[in-house]
Amino acid sequence: AETAPGAVHVPDWLAPQRQRELLDACRAWARPPAGLRTVRTPGGGTMTARQVCLGRHWYPYGYAPTAVDGDGAPVKPFPAWLDDLARHAVTDALGAAALAPEPYDIALINFYDGEARMGMHRDADERSDAPVVSLSLGDTCVFRFGNPGTRTRPYVDTELRSGDLFVFGGPSRLAYHGVPKVHPGTAPPELGLAGRLNITLRVSGL
Ligand code: MD3
Ligand code: FE
């Protein structure tokens, strides 16, 4: 369903077995070196969602020119199967015409415990206007989409559940968005995940 122009939500896009496989991959990526880290903001704060990067090191607000993560270790590579997954997702949600010519080359994986949030922001650090692909695993969250062009009300709130796909292209690519709430204990029990994972796949254009 189209939530805003270019923003398409596909509930249950990942079958349970695919969710399990993606979770297993995330667990491996989260291990050191260059594993799950706490992101510090320029103002001296910390992001409450912890993060792992693949392909390039993201920091607020840019991509590091060197492939070095928080612990000094090289960022893990972005595997080719994630580019295949992103292209499949964009084609299903927006159609093949929305596909970028360049490969997807960055993944940012955010882990939310019951208290974690993400404030309203725009993702403007990529040089490409290719659609961003978002996949959710584990606990349900409230996903907040800003009024186009602003970070103010009226917001559109939707719930993102385990297995959901959201693709942000066209005019929605630079829209404000955030995660004001995670609902603890709502993950599918068979997944064995306490908390929420969000995987975003991006084209850096760098
Ligand atoms: C709209 N992640 O990684 S997913 C992010 O659930 C981020 O972890 C949230 O915002 C999360 O930057 C929200 C939905 C989402 C992700 C990326 C977007 C919406 C987006 C990029 C551009 C526009
Ligand atoms: Fe974002």
Image: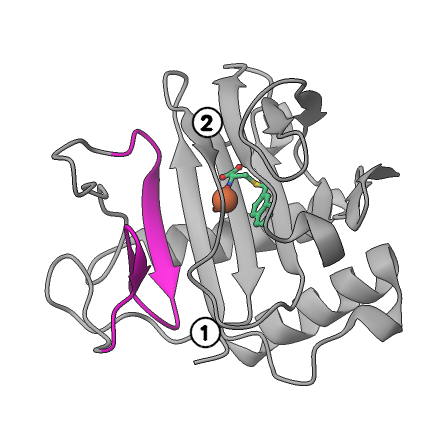
Q: Give above or below for 90 relative to 109.
A: below
* Image quadrant where residue 63 sits: bottom left
Q: Amino acid at mark 2?
A: Gly
Q: Which residue is mark 1?
A: 78
Quadrant where the C terminus is found in the figure = bottom left
* Image quadrant where residue 5 sits: top right
- What residue is at 80 percent from the left and 69 percent from the top? 98
Which is more foreground, mark 2 or mark 1? Answer: 1
Q: Depth check: 174 or 202 in front?
A: 174
- What residue is at 47 percent from the left and 56 percent from the top? 124
Where are the magenta residues, as a range? 47-65
Q: Are marks 2 and 1 in contact (CB under 8 Å)?
A: no
- What residue is at 23 percent from the left and 61 percent from the top? 34
Q: Amino acid at mark 1?
A: Phe
Q: CA distance from mark 2 to mark 1?
A: 24 Å
Q: Earlier in the sequence, mark 2 or mark 1?
A: 1
Q: Position of residue 47 (x, y in %)?
A: 28, 34
Quadrant where the N terminus is found in the figure = top right
Q: Secondary structure at mark 2?
A: loop
Q: Depth check: 170 or 101 in front?
A: 170
Magenta stretch: residue 64 in it? yes
Q: Which residue is mark 2?
A: 195
- In the image: residue 146, left or right of residue 30: right
Q: Depth check: 161 or 159 in front?
A: 159
Magenta stretch: residue 72 in it? no
Q: What kind of colouring is applied to the model shown?
A: one colour
How would you rate the neighbour count of disc 2 (Cα within 10 Å): few for under 14, some for 14-19, many for 20 or more?
many
